[in-house]
């Protein structure tokens, strides 16, 4: 049903408009009395064998929704009711910003991909913090594991980036089950420069300190999200830095600026313009980076695999490559609201066929000898 709806309705709408309509419908259904529970019963069946523990947190399964879909924390638990085992909101910046001029989101249907140059459009850390406060207590009282992804405000100079990230951390860390520093979007000028270890070191150290000062009752897990376009030696350097600073994990990978190997016509690709490419074309490089990270860090960090994840087989491949958790986003556009359910049913079937007792046994067999 959804593929037909996408073909004849969503595909003919501006991609950003379609996103707002689809997300609005999900929130509307979830906020009808009993609606969220009904959604979860149909779309989020839980197989106990898929449960995962990471950062000291119990996840109902390994598959979550990546940052970018819910930038402003307006539908966290409704998305959880669609079968996502965790939801990462953001990217949130310290100051509210409109993002880049529209049009800024484009589909490449032949590649099951999307190009975006959204530019961290969001309501700002203060507004998002107020929304999260109104949402109520963290788990276990709230059903959805929540990641909070923070980035640099566009108008803030690169030299002042540390203070900008700290301001977001001070407002948002208390509401996060885990916190992500995003230095890898291609749509904020100069942001990817922050991935250089000599710049990244003081930034991550300051965010860690701010989280510890702000949240004293527990340790908020801290991760960094990296780009697939990093050279292998830079991936190694970030991995070494994460170990040095005692980070909890790395998310690999964000969108790419590459346009190589696409099936879409050159004219269609050119019409999209600049921005980050996400979806199926990222699959090979994202897995490659994930394997490299696991070989580098062993079992000392939690790795989150993302980029080109479409099917249960893709999730399984990431788990075998060393991920503890896996995220998707772009395929949600093409697969619709039954996507999470499909992933979970496929994972359960793969698990039974493998003879393993739990999904944790899959990650335990991943190569983990430090390089």
Image (cartoon, grey):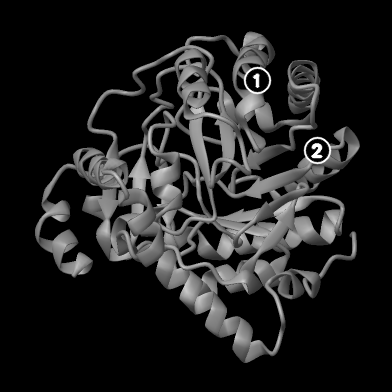
Q: Position of residue 31 (x, y in %)?
A: 30, 41
Q: Is residue 154 visible?
A: yes
Image point 40% across, 19% down: which residue? 123
Q: Quadrant of residue 240?
A: top right
The answer to whether residue 353 is above or below residue 11 is: below
The quadrant in which residue 102 appears is top left
Mark 1 vs 2, N-terminal side: 1
Query: x, y (%) of residue 187?
Result: 45, 30
Q: Position of residue 50 (x, y in %)?
A: 62, 69
Residue 247's mark?
Answer: 2
Tell me if mark 2 has few (under 14), some (14-19) or many (20+) residues whose alpha carbon lies within 10 angstroms of its own: many
- In the displayed structure image, the side of residue 11 where residue 360 appears, left or right: right
* Gap in angstroms between the C-alphas marked 1 and 2: 15 Å
Q: Residue 248: which numbered mark, if any?
A: none
* Closer-to-camera residue (246/254): 246
Q: Which residue is mark 1?
A: 169
> Of residues 173 and 131, which is closer to you in this image?
131
Visible residue check, residue 264: no
At a point 36% along the width and 50% down the height, the residue shown is 36
């Amino acid at each position: 049903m959804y593929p037909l709806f996408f073909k004849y309705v969503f595909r003919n709408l501006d991609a950003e408009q379609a996103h707002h309509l689809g997300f609005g419908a999900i929130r509307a259904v979830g906020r009808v009395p009993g609606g969220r529970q009904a959604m979860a019963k149909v779309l989020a069946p839980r197989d106990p064998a898929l449960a995962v523990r990471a950062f000291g947190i119990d996840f109902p399964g390994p598959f979550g929704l990546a940052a970018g879909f819910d930038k402003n924390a307006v539908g966290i638990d409704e998305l959880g009711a669609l079968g996502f085992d965790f939801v990462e909101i953001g990217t949130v910046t310290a100051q509210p910003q409109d993002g880049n001029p529209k049009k800024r989101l484009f589909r490449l249907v032949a590649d099951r991909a999307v190009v975006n140059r959204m530019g961290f459009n969001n309501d700002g850390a203060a507004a998002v913090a107020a929304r999260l406060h109104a949402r109520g207590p963290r788990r276990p009282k709230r059903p959805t594991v929540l990641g909070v992804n923070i980035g640099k405000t566009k108008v803030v100079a690169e030299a002042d980036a540390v203070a900008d990230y700290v301001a977001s951390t001070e407002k948002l860390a208390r509401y996060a089950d885990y916190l992500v520093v995003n230095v890898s979007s291609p749509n904020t000028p100069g942001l990817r420069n922050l991935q250089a270890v000599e710049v990244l070191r003081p930034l991550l150290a300051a965010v860690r300190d701010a989280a510890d000062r702000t949240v004293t009752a527990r340790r908020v897990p801290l991760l960094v999200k990296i780009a697939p376009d990093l050279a292998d030696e830079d991936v190694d350097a970030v991995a070494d830095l994460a170990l040095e600073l005692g980070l909890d994990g790395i998310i690999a990978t964000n969108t790419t600026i590459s346009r190589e190997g696409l099936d879409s016509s050159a004219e269609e690709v050119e019409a999209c313009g600049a921005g980050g490419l996400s979806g199926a074309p990222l699959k090979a490089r994202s897995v490659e980076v994930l394997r490299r990270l696991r070989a580098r860090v062993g079992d000392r960090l939690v790795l989150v695999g993302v980029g080109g994840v479409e099917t249960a087989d893709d999730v399984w491949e990431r788990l075998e490559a060393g991920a503890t958790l896996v995220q998707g986003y772009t395929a949600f556009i093409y697969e619709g609201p039954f996507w999470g359910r499909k992933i979970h049913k496929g994972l359960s079937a793969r698990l039974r066929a493998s003879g393993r007792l739990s999904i944790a046994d899959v990650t335990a067999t991943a190569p983990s000898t430090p390089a």
